[in-house]
Amino acid sequence: MNIKEVAKLARVSTATVSRTMNLSEKVRPETAKRVLRAIETLNFHPDTNARALGSGRSNLYGLIISDITNPFFPELVKSFEDIAVRHRQEVLVSNTNYEPERMKICVQRMLQRRVEGVAIMTSEMDDHLIEDFRRMHIPMVFLDSGTPEPGVSCVRLDYSAGVDAAMRHLIKLRHKRIAFLTGPLKLASAQARYKAFLESTARHRLDTSPELIQEGNHQMEGGREAMRRVLSSRRRPTAVLASNDLTAIGAMGAIAEAGLRVPEDISVIGFDDIQMSAFVSPPLTTVAMPRAKIAAAAFHALFREESPRAAKSLKGEMHIIQPALVLRKSTGPARRK
C-alpha cells in the first residue's frame, strides 16, 4: 500500500494526501475528510522515515529529563506527549540520571533522529551540548535556566511565590520555628527553592538557625535522613517545609519513627504535588507545580505547524508558571508549649 493508491481513491494528488496527513490548513475540510476516509479504507500506514526525508521534517520532538524515578517527571512526560499526540507529533524521551555521559548520549540520539525541537527539562546541560543543537538550528526550550533569544525559549517556575505561600500558611497557623529540607544544592531548582526559603524567613523575621536547614537528595530516604538530623537538634521545629514531595514523605517517616505525630507535633509541607502526595497518611499539604501547564508552555514554544525546523525563525519566549498551595491534612496549628 502506498500514497499513490490513497490519492487515487480520494481523487486528489499525492501532495494533497501529504498535506492532509501533516494537518495543513491549505487542504479544504471536505477534501481532508475524503483523504482520511481513503486512508482508513485502505488501512494505510505511512513510512514516517520516508516522509521525513521527503519533507525535511521528522515530526519528532525531544524531551530530556533528569530522573525518571521521580514522579514529577513521568507526569511531565505524559502531559508533553499528550499535547504532541494531539498535534500528530512524536516524542523522543531521554533520561540523563544526572550523569554527564548519559547526557551526551541523549543529545546524540536527538541529533541522529533529526528532532524538530528539544525541551530540556534539566539544569545540568553543558554549554557545548547546547551549541550542538544551535549549530543544527534546532529550537530549544529550557526549564529554570537560560535566557530567551532567537530559537531559545525558557519556562520558569515561580519558586519564590510558592515558598512564600507555604510560609504564610504556616505563619497563619502560629508556627515560628520552621525547618527546611533542601534538595541537592548542585541543582539550580534546589538552589532556587533554598534561596526563596531564606528570603521568606528574612521577610517574616523567623529563626534561621543552621540546624533547621538540612540537605536531602530529592528522594524519600534523603528526606528521612535530613529530618532525623533536624530532630536531633537542641530545639525541634514545629513545622518543616521540604524542597519536594518525596523529601516531605521521607520526613514524615522520620517524624513517626521519633514517636511524633503529623500535624499535631510537627506540620509538614511538600513541593510539586505529585500524585501520591494525596494518598499518604495524613495527605500532604504541598505547593503544586502544574505539569500540564509546564508541558504546554514547553511544547508550544517549539511547535510550528507549517515551518521546517529552523531556530532562527522562532522568537525566544519566556513563560512564568505560577504555583498553587494545596491544603490537605499534614498542617495544623503550632502546638502550644
Image (cartoon, rainbow, N blue to C red):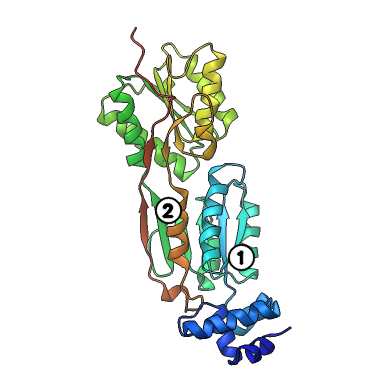
Residue 302 rendering spot, x and y as whole percentages: 47, 67
Residue 240 rendering spot, x and y as whole percentages: 42, 24
- From the viewer's perspective, tell me whether residue 124 is left or right of residue 3: left
User: In this picture, is 188 found above or below 250?
Assistant: below
User: In this picture, is 249 found above or below 124?
Assistant: above
> Which quadrant: the N terminus?
bottom right
- From the viewer's perspective, tell me whether residue 7 is left or right of residue 165: right
- Pointer 1 residue: 110
User: In this picture, is 109 found above or below 52?
Assistant: above
Tag 2: amino acid: Lys
- Mark 1 vs mark 2, foreground winner is 2
Residue 155 rendering spot, x and y as whole percentages: 41, 55
Near-viewer residue (133 or 326)? 326
Report crowding for label 2: few under 14, some 14 to 19, many 20 or more residues within 10 A (C-alpha): some
Report crowding for label 1: few under 14, some 14 to 19, many 20 or more residues within 10 A (C-alpha): many
Tag 1: amino acid: Met
In the rendered structure, find residue 293 and report the number of the disc placed on it.
Answer: 2
SS label for mark 1: helix
Q: Residue at x 37, y 43 (%)?
A: 323
Measure how far apart labels 1 and 2 are at the Cα level. Answer: 24 Å
Q: Farthest right residue?
A: 1
